[in-house]
Structure formats: C-alpha cells, structure tokens
Amino acid sequence: MKGAGLAAVKWAVTVLAGVLLAWLGWQVFNWAVLKAVFQPDLLACQSLDHAGACWGVVAEKFRPMVLGAYPHEAQWRPLTALALTGAFACVAFGSVWAPRGWRLSSRAAWFLGLCWLLGSLGLMRGGFAGLESVPVSQWGGLPLTLVLAVASLVLSLPLGILLALGRRSPHAGLSLPCTVFIETVRGVPLVTLLFMAAFMLPALFPADAQPSLFGRVLATLSLFSAAYLAELVRAGLQTVPAEQVEAAQVLGLTGWRIQLKVVLPQALRAVLPALVSHTIGLLKDTSLVMVVSLHELTGSLGLALGGDADWRPFYFEGYLFIAAIYALMCLGLARLGRRIEAGWQQAVR
C-alpha cells in the first residue's frame, strides 16, 4: 500500500508539472508568435501594450544592433566579414563531421583560420585597395565580439601554457612569479581589471603615446584568460604519467621537444571539455567590455535603443534577440568540442 501511494503521488506530481509546463509553453508561444508583430511598424507595436512581442524592433534596428557604430556607407564590409566567419565555421564543422579521409589536416585548418582572421580584420580595417580606413574605435556589435573573443583566446592559450609550465618548474625564480600572477589575476573580478585598464593604465604612458582602448581591453582579456587557462593546463599536465617523459628521454627527446611532442598533446586532450567551457565563458565575458565604452553586441543594443525614445520600450525583445545569438554561438562551440572529443576517443581506441 505504501508503495502504491508513493507511485500515485509521483504520478500526480508528474501530471501537475506537465500541465504547468504546457501552460507556460502556451503563454510563451501566444506572446512570441500569435500576438507578435514582425514588421517594423511602430504604431502596431505600441498598440500591443506588451501583450505580444514586438519583433519589429529587430527588423528596424538590426544593423545598429549587430554592427554597432560602424559607418553606415561601409557596413557591407563587416557584413562580408560575418559571411566569411559563417563560411569558415561551416568548413570547420564539416571537416569535424566528415569521414576521416575527407577531414582537413591541422596545417590546412590553421591556414584557413589565419586567412579568415586576417581577411576579416583587413576588410573591416581598410586602408588599402581603395577602402577607406575605419579605426577600431568605430567597430562594434557582433564583429567586435568575435574579434575580442578569438584574438584573446589565440593570445592567451600559448601564454597560459607557458604559465602552467613555469608554475610547475622546480626553480623558485620561475615558479613564484607565475604563481603570484595566476593567483592575483584569478582573485580579481574581470570588471575591475577592465576599469583599471581603461582609466588607470593610461596614466603610466606619455600623453602622446597612449595605447588604444581596444588594445588595452584586448590585453586585459588575454591576461585574464591566460591565468585561468594556466590552471586548466596544469591540471592536464598532472594527468600525464611520469613514465611518458622517461620513455621520451630514452628515445632521445629532451627539454621542450618532450613537452611539445609528448606531454602537452596528452594534457590538452585530457582537459578538452574544460577548455571548451573556458572558450564559451570567454565569449560571454566579452559583453563586459561595454562598461568601458566598447560597444560589442550587448553594448550596441544599448546604443541602438537608448537614443530612440520610440523604440526604447522594446528592450526586452532586443535582449532576447541578442541572447539567441549568444546561445547559437555557445551551443555551436559546445557541439564542436563534443565532436572533437569523440573523435579523439575513437582514435585512441
């Protein structure tokens, strides 16, 4: 009897939860689709009185939300850069899911990635082939988010590896500075470091040699990321058996060649899920740069709606649109990381 009563309670809770979820799902669908306005019709949106979603704000403010303050007459350039990014992402995903014989080699992948990065940056920066130069201070939106995320990851990964190796060094003169740097940076919020880079760091430079705000923010993100990556890599290094190093020494490898050929590949493979999580976190952390007046994707939304009293009441729909972009990027990175991990496990077997 006691078991039957418990089963009845579980069944009742399941039914109530299902009914509640169905009701919530209907309310969201009714607000987001059935009663929504999809055209950039301000009067129709205002007449809803928030009873339905005004997706027209996305259609009306798409360019300033996605591209920021980039000059309007040259916005085809960041749009082309985003198209190149999408093409590179399709090639990368396709290579990971392709049969083994059709996959890109590491060198080809690095070459394509370098071409994509330099091509996108050059197109947005201009200053050649008749393209007007656009300073980084006018970049914004999704392109700036991607540039900050990719550049800070590329810069911080080798630095994080060096910090991890330095912290494990038996020499106190090398391990102590690395340890102090890692623990100090990890103990300070990123927002604090960004404020210091934006408002305190310029005081250390002459007035005629001030580093750009973009450069200071990029350096801050890179150093912050390197401190966390160092701990991830150090955890991976501890999983590599000492016998692996001894075997490499027997084969004639020494010093850095052992680290590059034997230890680091195994260490990075062991912490791949954590590295993917860190990359996703770094991508989302770029949204914090808006506090120092760099208008990436989230900051561009504030610029697009903050100065327009007519469309300002529809911030919620705008934030949902920005959240959807972040979700797609993060879910894509997570899926890519799982696929790479599965491929490595199959190769080991």
Image: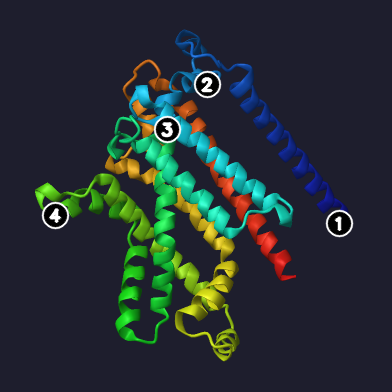
Mark 3 or 4, which is nearer the eye?
3
x, y percentage for residue 276? 55, 57
Question: Within 10 angstroms of label 3, few (less than 14), some, or many (20 or more) residues?
Answer: many
Which residue corresponds to mark 4? Answer: 205
Residue highlighted by disc 3: 78
Q: Are marks 1 and 3 in contact (CB under 8 Å)?
A: no
For the residues labelled 2 and 1, the Cα–Cα distance comes to: 51 Å
Q: Amino acid at mark 2?
A: Trp
Task: Name the secondary structure under disc 4.
Answer: loop
Residue 36 location in percent, x, y? 58, 18
Label 1: which secondary element: helix
Q: Which residue is mark 1?
A: 3
- Residue located 65% across and 31% down the image: 24
- Label 3 or label 2, whichever comes before in sequence order: 2
Q: Amino acid at mark 3?
A: Pro
The Cα atoms of the two marked residues, 4 and 1, are separated by 75 Å
Disc on res. 325? none
Residue in view at x 43 percent, y 25 percent: 63
Residue 221 at least partly seen: yes
- Nearer to us of marks 2 and 4 is 4
**Does 272 appear above or below 92?**
below
- Residue picked out by circle 2: 55
| Mark in the foreground, 4 or 1 | 4
Task: Give the residue at the far left of this rendering.
Answer: 207
* Residue type at tag 4: Phe
**Mark 2, secondary structure of its residue:** loop
Which residue is drawn at the image coordinates 77% and 39% (left, top)? Answer: 15
